[in-house]
Amino acid sequence: MLNLTSAFDSPRWIEITSGLWILLLFALAIALNGLTMGVYVKYPKMVNVTSFFTVAIITNGLLSSALGYIPVIIAEFSGHWLVHMSEDSCIAEALIVYYFGCSSMFLHVCIAYIRYQGIVALPTSNAPVEKWRVALAFGACQLLSLVLAVSPLLGLGAYGLEAHGTSCGLAWNDRSRAGLGYLILIGTVCYVFPVTFMCVCYVQIVKTVSAGLCTLIL
């Protein structure tokens, strides 16, 4: 049985409004990510070491939207996930969303580091980003994301229905030792550490750019 994060009935108009809103987000996500990806496909020379992670994030957005939004839209319009879909599909949707979400967060960390290296560190080290390092970082991002997303299927944490039963995600009401440990782990690894690292990188970038502008002005 699914671990229910919460359970309450919503008025029908809220479900329909939510379904329309998610449908709009789905259309925008597919259109904008697809348009951006089309530019890279048309001009493949734009894809380089620096933009590779951007392309990967766009790909994540397309796949996550195509695989994750549709069942949620169906659940919203039908009133509950289990009206037309199974418990297994709920777990699969949650796994997809968390896998691509974690992956995108880690890829943003890689982008922040590359920008830091190019603006702050490169003038002193003059060392270009090597392709094998990019491949290694990308592989590490995907592997870590996969491990974190699959862990609830192996007993560390749990996936379940969220809100009023029309979307799926982590079972935030799981108070077992394994459940709490996983919630702390994913919150730290997928949010606290990445955000802190990116903030440090961008603060240093802003300082370097500001110092350069002041030098030019003076």
Image (spheres, helix red, strand yellow):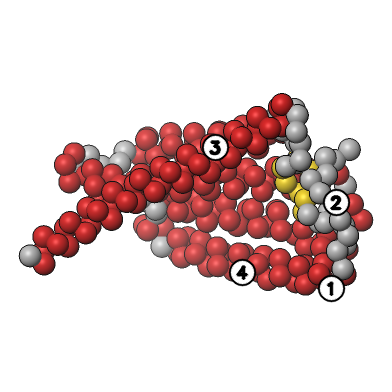
First in residue order: circle 3 vs circle 1:
1
Please report the residue visible at 62 percent of the width from the left and 43 percent of the height from the top: 99
Distance (Cα) linking label 3 and label 2: 27 Å
Q: In screen coordinates, is 100 left or right of 45?
A: right
Q: In screen coordinates, is 128 left or right of 66?
A: left
First in residue order: circle 3 vs circle 4:
4
First in residue order: circle 1 vs circle 4:
1
First in residue order: circle 3 vs circle 2:
2
Residue 71 visible: no
Distance (Cα) linking label 3 and label 1: 37 Å
State the residue position of label 3: 188
Mark 2 surroundings: few (<14), some (14-19) or many (≥20) residues within 10 A:
few
Q: In screen coordinates, is 59 left or right of 90?
A: left
First in residue order: circle 2 vs circle 4:
2
State the residue position of label 4: 28
State the residue position of label 2: 7
Q: Quadrant of the N terminus?
A: top right
Kindly report which numbered mark, 2 or 1, lies closer to the viewer in this rendering: 2
Kindly report which numbered mark, 1 or 4, lies closer to the viewer in this rendering: 1
Q: From the top left corner, tell me how far across and down residue 182 is, in percent.
A: 65, 32
Query: What is the number of the mark on residue 217?
Result: none
Please report the residue visible at 89 percent of the width from the left and 52 percent of the height from the top: 82
Residue 97 visible: yes
Q: Amino acid at mark 2?
A: Ala
State the residue position of label 1: 13
Residue 45 picture quarter:
bottom left
Indicate the secondary structure of the residue bearing disc 4. helix
Q: Amino acid at mark 3?
A: Thr
Q: Amino acid at mark 4?
A: Leu
Distance (Cα) linking label 2 and label 4: 30 Å
